[in-house]
Amino acid sequence: MRGINGIETVVYGVADVDECVRYFDDFGLPLTEHSSGASALFELEQGCSVIILPLAEAVVAAQRLEGFGVQQVIWGVPNQKQFDRVVDKLRRATEVTIDEDGTARFFDCDGIAMGIRIYAKQRIWGAPDPVNSFGNVGRMNQHRKWKLKANPKTIEHVVYQVPDPQASWEWYRDNLDFRLSDVQEGFGVFARAPGTNEHHSIYWLKADLPFPGLDGKVRFNHVNYGVEDLDEVMVGANYMERRGWQKSIWGLGRHRIASSVFMYLPCPAGGDAEYGTDSDVLDDSWIPRTWNSRFGSMSFMHNLQPWIFDEAPWSVAYVDGATPARKTQPHAQQPSEVLPVSPTDAAGALPNVAHKEAYHAQDTSGAK
């Protein structure tokens, strides 16, 4: 793989360093250094870092980002050769400076402070408990692991609220070789760094949507921290509640886009801190989809919100131009909101031969 291989460091600018240290310690991040009231460093098992600073020290002059939260994202590359290649290309689009420690600094198209440095990314091995299901026994005479609190090992992605997600994506595509993962119609764009397989490394959320906290300005939204499985998500959330932190508004859920389990927790460092697990893994053979915004948001959510209370139309298609014009229908028996597809095309999206045969046996004469 070539180019950026993930998020090496996020730098939070906060109102109260010590409160945020207590929060992330309870959240499960491994604390390495802490100077009371001044700074803190958390280092995760994958080799990535979280830095906590007072807002005035974290803000980079001339940036357009508003409010508390992650003021700087440092992207990693595996070696000097890749560093030089990425920086040389980036310099054709924007000014880049190199720090004494070798970090390349720049602003992206939204005025968010970014960096690039060599990242010794470590391979993480998970050992989730096997799952038992009907006729498929993964655990015999064995109970599941018991966990005390969460232990996030990775930084999966970062999310920013921006005026034009499409323009942001195109800038990262053209200048940093990011890959398009999926498009959430009217909401935002998901993209991954070229040297990663995580579904997305960054998501740009449209900043003027009619939701709390969205005011049209460039703002931080959240960071996703990767844990092993759903059990660890819930153990972490319960531990945070016992420690007195604010509960999740949405509760436990699973996105359709990326398939990932989520738990967003309000964070005193700004935005939310998300526990995430069981996300889709992609390579360059992936064909990006465009999703109805509500349909893509979730498969389920514990605390249904008003905007998602009614079932969303089952609507998903390949991104125009990403592949020959071929639409997909996720289920033959969905109502008339489904996209106009032929039975052959829709069945072609189903991986199981038996499913394809069942699909062709359905009466699709009423489909639009």
Image (spheres, rainbow, N blue to C red):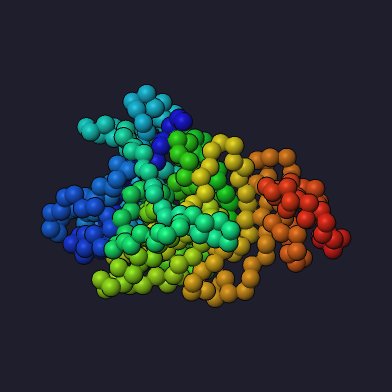
Which residue is pictured at 69% across the width and 56% down the height? Answer: 330
Q: Nearer the viewer, residue 319 or 13?
A: 319
In the drawing, does residue 237 fall left or right of residue 30?
right
x 62%, y 49%: residue: 289
Residue drawn at (21%, 53%) of the image: 31
Residue at (25% x, 47% y) in the render: 43
Let me know if residue 243 appears in the view: yes
Left or right: residue 38 compared with residue 249: left
On the image, the x and y values in percent for residue 147 come to 31, 61
Tell me where residue 243 appears, x and y as whole percent. Answer: 25, 71
**Rendered view: 292 above or below 350:** below
Q: Which of these two is toward me, 357 or 194?
A: 357
Q: Where, quadrant-wise, is the C terminus in this rendering?
A: bottom right
Q: How many marks?
A: 0
User: Which quadrant of the view contains residue 188?
Assistant: bottom right
Q: Is residue 16 visible?
A: no
Q: Position of residue 161 (x, y in %)?
A: 45, 57
